[in-house]
Image (cartoon, rainbow, N blue to C red):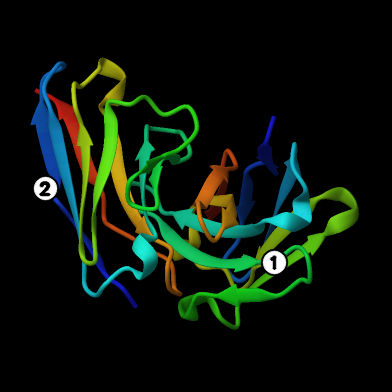
Amino acid sequence: EIVLTQSPGTLSLSPGERATLSCRASQSVSSSYLAWFQQKPGQAPRLLIYGASSRATGIPDRFSGSGSGTDFTLTISRLEPEDFAVYYCQQYGSSPITFGQGTRLEIK
Amino acid sequence: QVQLVQSGAEVKKPGASVKVSCKASGYTFTAYYIHWVRQAPGQGLEWMGWINPNNGGTNYAQEFQGWVTMTRDTSISTAYMELSRLTSDDTAVYYCARGSVALGTDIWGQGTMVTVSS
């Protein structure tokens, strides 16, 4: 099983700032099948990034993903008020599918 | 539009079973897998397994083997997840999600809250 470790656990930033979230895998993620999700309270997760760097339909270009192998990053270039939420990474290249424990992005 | 609509909240007693449905619309039901993911209150996301609606094939996470059953009815584009021998630890929101090799899980249902309480 691939274990995903996200850091930091909580990130406190202000609107307009840049956010950098990290996801490290315990072994190489097959074919960069790494996704990022945003989840707000009471809502289902929303797919932001798939294939490590491809934006899902309708996702603003301030969201970008990068990385390969075992190290992946989600960057939000300029934070908007609606971006404050919990973010999860997920690997779907091997079974079982696994998720990171989440990074909470909060308003400073 | 593409969407997955799940059945409503459930309250069950310990030892009972629960069956959650997930109705797909806006796409060809048999062309994508359906995954099930759960989230306990205040916790992270836990993958339970998937079903291939085309042939009914399943792949369950090891933790759930023996007490989860995933099925589908292609005539009504609906997938089901049944969990048996419920305990309080199964109290969670259960999500279905559309799955593909390239995109992973791209479309999610709204979630079904299952509460297990005596």
Does A5 appear above or below A1? above
Q: Any mark on residue A38, and which?
A: none
Nearer the observer, B93 or A108? A108
Q: Any mark on residue A8, and which?
A: 2
Kindly identify the amino acid type of the residue bearing the numbered disc 1. Asn
Q: Name which residue lies at 25% across and 16% down.
A: A81
The spot of residue B114 in percent (x, y) is: 56, 51
Give the crowd class for mark 1: few <14, some 14-19, many >=20 residues within 10 Å: many
Does A66 appear above or below B50? above
Q: Name which residue lies at 91% across and 54% down.
A: B75
Q: Which residue is mark 1?
A: B52
**Can you see residue B110?**
yes
Element at label 2: loop
Q: Quadrant of residue A80?
A: top left
**Can you see residue B117?**
no
The spot of residue B5 in percent (x, y) is: 68, 39
Element at label 1: loop
Kindly identify the amino acid type of the residue bearing the numbered disc 2. Pro
Nearer the observer, A51 or B83? A51
Q: CA distance from mark 1 to mark 2?
A: 36 Å
Q: Is residue A93 left or right of residue A5?
A: right
Q: Is residue A64 left or right of residue B28?
A: left
The spot of residue B117 in percent (x, y) is: 53, 56
Q: Is residue B20 left or right of residue A16?
A: right
Q: Chain of mark 1?
A: B
Q: Quadrant of residue A11?
A: top left
Nearer the observer, B99 or B86? B99
Nearer the observer, B102 or B90? B102
